Image: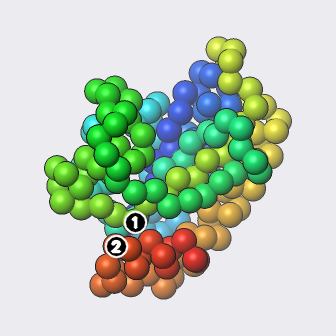
Amino acid sequence: MAALLIGFGNQGRGDDGLGPVFAERIERAAPDGLEIDIDYQLTVDHALAVSEVDLVVFADAEIGAEGSFSFAPVAASGATGMGSHELSPQAVLTLAKTLYGREPAAFLLGIAGWDYGEVKEGLSSEAKAHLDEAEAFFLDWYARVSADYAPSNGASRRTERLADA
């Protein structure tokens, strides 16, 4: 299985840097078959990389989360919100499907943060605790998914299997 984790966010805005910090931690853990991409924001350039994998997970900070983190499937959607400099995960998937004919199984991992307003590096203590929980969840989930992934299934079936893992 070819898999990609894209951690994105602004590390100069406090907890908005949760996505990149999460991706750095997962990169150090080095799960088999998982490529890591760390960026400030999602752009049209990510569509090609997304089109080349079976599974993509987008990791970002989440404002107003109900728990420590959320994890949900995402899919290609209409062309709304497609700018030249910043895209949603759904827009990146739409571009991958439109330009390259591929839409991998995809998920959004939103990690709850608290401190976003001030220009500063580093995470709040609350965000660090949420990051620890998200990392433990993801490593366990990815180990289960990569162990029994069957690439011959259709995209919707893969998404169901991955979400249930």
The location of residue 24, given as percent across then percent down, is: 56, 45
Between residue 94 and residue 113, name the one nearer to us.
Answer: 94
Q: Looking at the image, can residue 132 be seen?
A: no
Please tell me whether mark 2 sits on a helix, a strand or a loop.
helix
Is 108 on the left or on the right of 52, as rendered?
Answer: right
Horizontal placement of 79 versus 147: left or right? left
Labelled disc at residue 105:
1
Give the amino acid type for the residue marked by disc 2 in the picture.
Ala
Measured as percent of width and height from the top left, residue 31 is found at 53, 65
User: What residue appears at the point 69 percent right and 15 percent down from the top-left corner?
Assistant: 118
Measure the alpha-carbon separation of dots 1 and 2: 6 Å
Asked whether 161 or 141 is in front, the reply is 161
Residue indicated by mark 2: 155
Q: What amino acid is found at the position of numbered circle 1 in the picture?
A: Ala
- In the rendered image, the quadrant that contains the C terminus is bottom right
Residue 111 position, x and y percent, is 66, 46
User: Alpha-carbon neighbours of circle 2 within 10 Å: few (<14), some, or many (≥20)?
Assistant: some
Q: Residue at x 33, y 83 (%)?
A: 153
